[in-house]
Amino acid sequence: MAHLLAAVSTMALLTACAVTPTPYSQDEFMARAKADRAAMFDGQEVLSKPLTLPEAVARVLKYNLDKRAKMMDEALALGQLDLDRFDLLPKLTANAGYTERSSPNATRSRDLYTQTTSTSNPSYSADRFSITSDLGLTWNILDFGVSYFSAQQNADRALIASERRRKTVANLVQEVRFTFWRAAAAQVLKSKVTDIITTAEKALADSERVENERLRNPTESLRVQKTLLESIRQLEAIDQELTTAKAELAALINVPPGSDFQLDIPENGGMTVPEWSLPIEQMEEAALINNPDLREQDYQSRIAVDDTRKEILKLLPGITFSLSRQYDQNSFLMDNRWNEVGTKITWNLLNLLSGPDRIKHADTAEDVATAKRVALRMAVLAQVHVISHQFLSAAKQYERADKLWKIEQRLAEASGNQSRGGTQNEIERVSTETSAIAAELRRFQTYAQMQSSYGKLQSTIGADTIPERLATHTLDGVSGAIAVNFGGKTPSPDPVPTAVPAGKETVAPVAALEPGRQDVVRDGLVWLGGKIASLADQVGK
């Protein structure tokens, strides 16, 4: 046996010394990249029709990878609640062992007073081979109390994960509002920009030929070329800005980059300013109640309070109850099976010395959490006013840009008619077309900014894009519900956020999880009673 143990120990030591870094091979990197690329777009519905804004938001909520990551964080936090139930249970341990001696454990006796050793033959009361086992149940009241508050804290962390998911969703919706209209500008203006650049380059080449052949005053030719080059430079800058817009939208809705998809852009007049009639006082109230950052800070404050309670609880002595069923194969025993019951009190007296400092530190943490919460509330109130003014300003800028675009459009039409009639040269037509394109781009840009401000305003007051309940979780169902919310009306001042566990898009609101914080302990105790009764029956047998 000793030789076997030595051999096993030597092999384990040599194995530990043989561990070296093993990098992935190039083929392994390629395989992982290929698998991850396939996983990026797995299970998505094919984009086979023009994309509307509600459908883009629905795809963001269902397929965006950042959203998926936040949902997994929330599912992980919710899963921790189930694990906390086991921490409320007693410790159930099963032990089994086998021992063997090369010779019996024989002993002689020695007189206590005379210190003379007995001359009788040695005796032993245990076999050379021994098999023992036990099944023990221990429950420490102090550990149960600490686990109770830990379960409450983890329930709050699950709610924090839900609020962070809400914030991620709001940010994504705000971003897709902005990016969708930039991509819409690219779709509408791309061909116009390309055509006018081609026309301007042709006119520039004609002007250079006229200059070289000295058919016109050189100064006049240079002025024409300068005007054309300025127009081309402006158009190329517009083209560069339009090029990246659709790729950014594709990344948000998790469509493979470079995919050719079309947007469903409303006709002129479809780009309307959303109605917003909520008074500033109601906006402040809604923000203080529903803002995800504020809700998260509220839960953080409650976690800090539970930390203080845990520190106070650790100052108390721990009472441990134990119940076990024992077995020993020793043939010398009268009873090889027996039950043991015990109670033990333990108290770490050093905790009394460090306890006041720990409690003071926990109280300070509570004060810090309170200060952060109050400061954040002030920041959110200020943000409500700032974003409200930004939205109104963006709406006004869009209205100005829309009027300017209509004027530039009429000027471009008049310039085209005069050019066809021979009363306007090609150079002026290029200039007026360039101005019209720039005005239309500003119209889309200001509308995108206005939509972004509107989304940020909704996010600040805590208004969710998805309703509390959905009849269906399909892409069409989600986009239809979002389209109703995008109808241009002021959102409810008291929206109910939704908590989404893994694999689902909607579930009961976060408020429904609030009682669960207390139910964690209540359900755990009910479950605990059943487990103890079952174990007691098994031990008694």
Image: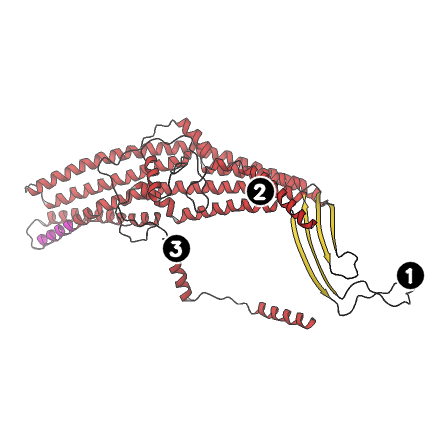
Residue 309: give x, y in percent of width and height: 62, 38
Res 368 visible: no
In whole angstroms, how far apart are the C-alphas of marks 2 and 1? Answer: 58 Å
Q: Magenta segment: does it hold 428?
A: no
- Residue type indicated by callout 1: Asp
Q: Earlier in the sequence, mark 3 or mark 1?
A: 3
- Residue type indicated by callout 3: Ala
Magenta residues, as a range? 198-211
- Residue type indicated by callout 2: Ala
Pick the front one: 326 or 33:
326
Q: Magenta: predominant secondary structure element?
A: helix
Residue 521: give x, y in percent of width and height: 59, 40
Residue 250: give x, y in percent of width and height: 32, 49
Residue 311: give x, y in percent of width and height: 64, 41
Residue identifier under label 2: 151
Residue appearing at x 79%, y 57% in the figure: 334
In screen coordinates, is 406 left or right of 276?
left
Q: Quadrant of residue 394?
A: top left
Quadrant where the N terminus lies? bottom right
Q: Quadrant of residue 305?
A: top right
Colour setup of the view? secondary structure
In whole angstroms, how far apart are the C-alphas of marks 3 and 2? Answer: 35 Å
Residue identifier under label 3: 39
Residue identifier under label 1: 111
Residue appearing at x 61%, y 71% in the figure: 11
